[in-house]
Amino acid sequence: MAGACGCEGPGLAATLRQDVDRYLFEVERGRSRRTGVVALLRVFVLFPGLWGVISYRVTHHAFLLRPRRLGYALGLTAQMFQRVVLALTGIEIDHRAHVGAGLMIPHSGFIVIGPVRIGRHCTISQGATIGHSTTEHDPDKWATPVLEDRTWVGPGAVIAGGIHVGADAVVGANSVLTRDVPDRGVVLGVPARLIARTGSFAQVAYRGMEQDADREAARVAAADPGGVTPTP
């Protein structure tokens, strides 16, 4: 199961710090090598995707507050702010989604994320759609995707229905998933097919990744030449 989101574990403040740090790390390791307040300012100016992440976090936590009436009132207020961010960035994240810390959206533009479950340190690109399948007949039984930790979703990708995407997987640009993706799987096409088991290590970067035991174990597994099992 994908890593717990802030409401299930570290809390809103700690989760937001990890979200912001994904972007800070990207700026600090770039050509500018900016640090401190300058880097933080660049993050908020250059990455409107962070606006969408923050507005989702606040709305998600507000609706879960108790007593329920207080949570509902604050949630509706936060949701109005989220609508403004949606108009500015084109990023829509359902407040019922459970998303692990360290979510990165590098670019704005027509991103739709429904009430799904997404793990830690995932990256969602512009134009991606993740949610329930419109081909399912019973709305009460709509299944939604689960994306495990460190997944990279490319521009224009569609992940709909009860799809499970394994840890360190890559969903290629403009791909449409119709089946599960194994850990470290790289899928591409319409419908998407497994083309490699090399993982998302080149696409997903975050502070402390070299000390992340789960990521390092996955890297070792990806180095095994017997791990590539393309789908015909």
Image (cartoon, grey):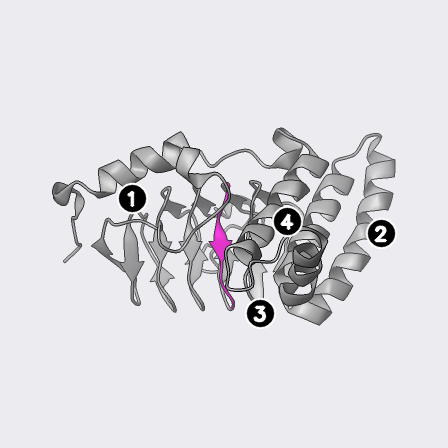
Q: Choose the circle earlier in sequence order: 1 or 3.
A: 3
Q: In terms of secondary structure, where does tag 1 sit?
A: loop
Instruction: State yes or no: discs 4 and 3 in contact (Cβ < 8 Å).
Output: no
In this rendering, the count of numbered labels is 4
Examine the rendered structure and indicate whether residue 84 appears above or below residue 20: below
Tell which tag, 4 or 3, sits nearer the viewer: 4
3D distance between C-alphas at marks 4 and 1: 29 Å
The residue stretch that appears in magenta:
120-126
Q: What amino acid type should be assigned to the residue bearing mark 4?
A: Val
**Which residue does the image show at 71% across and 59% down from the upper left?**
41
In this figure, which residue is indicated by the disc labeled 4? 20
Q: Choose the circle earlier in sequence order: 4 or 3.
A: 4
* Label at residue 110: 3
Residue 94 in the image, given as x and y percentages of width and height: 64, 52
Q: What amino acid type should be assigned to the residue bearing mark 2?
A: Thr
3D distance between C-alphas at marks 1 and 2: 39 Å
Instruction: State yes or no: discs 1 and 3 in contact (Cβ < 8 Å).
Output: no
* Label at residue 77: 2
